[in-house]
Amino acid sequence: MRRRTFGRTTGAGSLLAATLTVFVTGCGIRTTSVPVDAGAAPSRVPCSVTDESASATTAQGMPVRVYLVCGSQLDPVDRRSPLPEEKAGGDPVRTATGLLAQLLAAPSDDEREAGFTTAVRSPLAVTGGHPGDAAGTLRLSRQPEDLAPTALSQIVCTFAASSAGAGDHTVLLGGPGSYPPKRYRCTTELRERPESTPPTAPIPIPSSS
């Protein structure tokens, strides 16, 4: 009886040891020193276009900067616009019109190879503000809130970084209806997560003379 009991105990101990081995292995603890090939690291798009990429045609225009989507973020791209009116201190509506045209245009071959895309889609136009709007207000042909969040983020950051902006990385933007415009802000967080809703800031009230 004792031998028979001892034999059963030994068998149970072996079963327990095997179970522990399976458990340890299942928990991800490496039981061998042989290296494991996990494959190549994922590559990241460059999100950069060299100066040599500009064609002879676009090089004749005025330099402008627009924000495109690359790697789920917004990154600035330097282009040249054919509109000579687009320059610092010019007409904000003309500047915004030229910038919007750049956002609506399909990225060039070099930009696509670098990973750039745009979420801004036509038909879309921009005009000046309505009577009673704060100075510098721009009005889109569609309500800003109706645009795709990433498209609105592109427009906000592009306009805010130009002479069409309202200063302090903001732009006064409204739609075609009677809704009042909002002062949208282009922040670091928005450029990192353009799919989020652009933050707003209070519109300054002009001081009475």
Image (tube, rainbow, N blue to C red):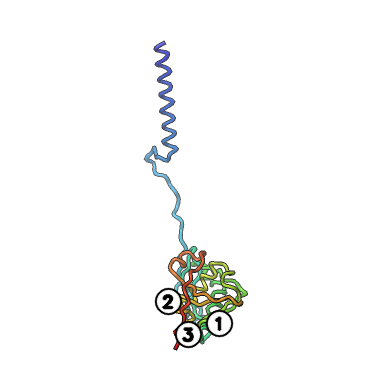
Give percent across and percent down for residue 135. 50, 83
Residue 82 in sight: no
Closer to us: 137 or 82: 137
Q: Which residue is mark 2?
A: 168
Q: Which residue is mark 3?
A: 87
Q: CA distance from mark 3 to mark 2?
A: 19 Å
Q: CA distance from mark 1 to mark 3?
A: 20 Å
The numbered disc on residue 112 is: none
Give percent across and percent down for residue 38. 44, 48
Tell me: residue 3, above or below residue 204. above
Give percent across and percent down for residue 77. 47, 73
Q: Residue at x 54, y 67 (%)?
A: 149
Closer to us: 186 or 28: 186
Q: Secondary structure at mark 2?
A: loop
Do callouts 1 and 2 mark residues in contact (Cβ within 8 Å)?
no
Q: Amino acid at mark 2?
A: Asp
Q: Mark 1 or mark 3: which comes first in sequence? A: 3
Q: Mark 1 or mark 2: which comes first in sequence? A: 1
Q: Amino acid at mark 3?
A: Lys
Q: Secondary structure at mark 3?
A: loop
Number of numbered labels in the structure image: 3
Q: Which residue is mark 1?
A: 129
Q: Residue at x 57, y 67 (%)?
A: 148
Q: Residue furthest left?
A: 33
Is 94 left or right of 16, judged from the image as shown?
A: right
Q: CA distance from mark 1 to mark 2?
A: 20 Å
Q: Mark 3 or mark 2: which comes first in sequence? A: 3
Observer-side mark, 1 or 3, equals 1
Closer to us: 25 or 169: 169
